[in-house]
Amino acid sequence: MLKNPSILKRAHEEMDQVIGRHRRLEESDLSKLPYLQAICKETFRKHPSTPLNLPRVSTEACQVNGYYIPKHTRLSVNIWAIGRDPDVWENPLDFTPERFLSGRNAKIDPRGNDFELIPFGAGRRICAGTRMGIVLVEYILGTLVHSFDWKLPDGGADGLNMDEAFGLALQKAVPLSAVVTPRLSASAYAL
């Protein structure tokens, strides 16, 4: 969103309309924020927390897309590659939350039923914390977006490094540096 301020602006507008600027985001607000949910889905698609799903072992020999897979083969699903597959996603390298607001992607859900978007895995071995993870990402991101204006320090979007450091969990290679300013009324920040 820092690289594309129009996305941040649209999220702010949605939150101002639904929540206003006199209180903080509450969990009950999340279902009324479809653009925020689309931002989270797009984030799950492009930057999954676990790029490779935990390994699985085939219980029997089978054939997938013309490839023979022997029994007892260890398999890993490349969630990162699925999210960037041009056969699945139009302009897969672009960060476009709008892709989840209409058309064939509008009903896609990150809870493991739509194999185009499986940030928490799928099937019997889906992450036990999937529902909590989705709510927490939406709530934390929503709180940060609603409560603050975000800007990049000198250098603007060209200075934002989005390289990733691969490992069991995906993380930024270079930590984010941003300037934040409060955007809500002072009473909204009081404990």
Image: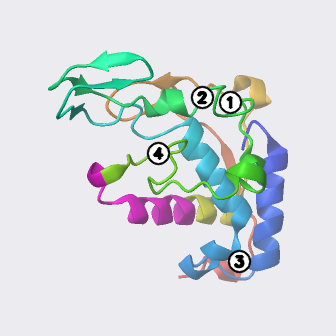
SS state under label 1:
loop
* Mark 1 lies on residue: 92
Q: CA distance from mark 3 to mark 4?
A: 39 Å
Q: CA distance from mark 4 to mark 2?
A: 12 Å
Decide which of 161, 30 is in the foreground and name it. 30
Is residue 79 visible in the rendered structure shown here? yes
* Prevailing SS of the magenta stretch: helix
User: Which badge, 2 or 3, comes first in the chain's sequence?
Assistant: 2
Residue at 73%, 38% in the rendered image: 152
User: Which badge, 1 or 4, comes first in the chain's sequence?
Assistant: 1
Q: CA distance from mark 1 to mark 2?
A: 5 Å
Q: CA distance from mark 1 to mark 3?
A: 40 Å
Q: Amino acid at mark 1?
A: Pro
Residue at 42%, 28% in the rendered image: 78
In percent of width and height, residue 127 lies at: 32, 53
Q: Amino acid at mark 4?
A: Ile
| Span shown in magenta | 124-140
Q: CA distance from mark 2 to mark 3?
A: 41 Å
Q: In the picture, residue 69 is in which quadrant? A: top left
Residue at 14%, 26% in the rendered image: 72
* Mark 4 lies on residue: 118
As for residue 141 lying within the magenta part, the answer is no
Decide which of 170, 116 is in the foreground and name it. 116
SS state under label 3:
helix
* Mark 3 lies on residue: 186
- Single out the mark in the foreground, 2 or 3: 2
Is residue 21 visible in the rendered structure shown here? no
Q: Which mark is residue 180?
A: none
In the displayed image of the protein, which residue is found farthest to the top? Answer: 67
